[in-house]
Image (cartoon, rainbow, N blue to C red):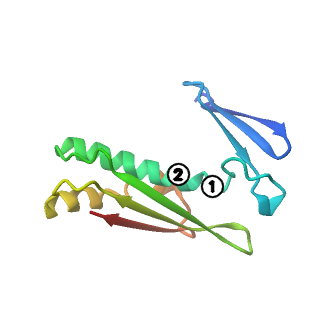
Amino acid sequence: MSVTIKSRYLGNLRVESTHLRSGTKIITDAPTDNRGKGESFSPTDLPAPSLGSCIMTIMGITAGDNKINIEGTEVEITKIMSASPGRVEEVIVAFYFPAKGYTEKEKKIIENVAGSSPVPLSISSEVKQTIRFYW
């Protein structure tokens, strides 16, 4: 097993994380309600795009396997925090598909895989996952 991500504390409540294989970097910053500047994703923000991206990826794989074109699909993600304890309480993921005249069968194929990818299956059952589709 090899390390995939290396992170370094930069000071001022910022952390830089590097994906070792690609060299891609992300910086997290504490949110303004927790002593940060809010100038980047907060650590509690990251599960939300991870969830949306993972679902979009499995939908893309499934779409490709079934010759369904979902290119141009967008996702809007809302993270809801609980006050006490401070934790992610719910993530709302809304997918907006381009007007391509999808059949009911195609819609069902795509919708049926939404919760079956690794991130949705890895997030605690205490975190509500609300997934919406707008065709």
- Residue type highlighted by circle 2: Pro
- The residue tagged with tag 1: helix, strand or loop? loop
Mark seen at residue 56? none
Mark seen at residue 49? 2
- Viewer can see residue 9: yes
Q: The C terminus lies in which quarter of the figure?
A: bottom left
> Circles 1 and 2: CB distance less than 8 Å?
yes
Q: Residue at x 48, y 52 (%)?
A: 119
Label 1 – label 2 distance at C-alpha: 7 Å
Q: Residue at x 37, y 67 (%)?
A: 132
Q: Give the image quarter of residue 25.
A: top right
- The residue tagged with tag 2: helix, strand or loop? helix
Q: Position of residue 127 (x, y in %)?
A: 56, 67
Is 117 positioned to the left or the right of 129 in the image?
left
Residue at image mark 1? 45
Q: Position of residue 40 (x, y in %)?
A: 68, 47
Q: Position of residue 7 (x, y in %)?
A: 72, 35
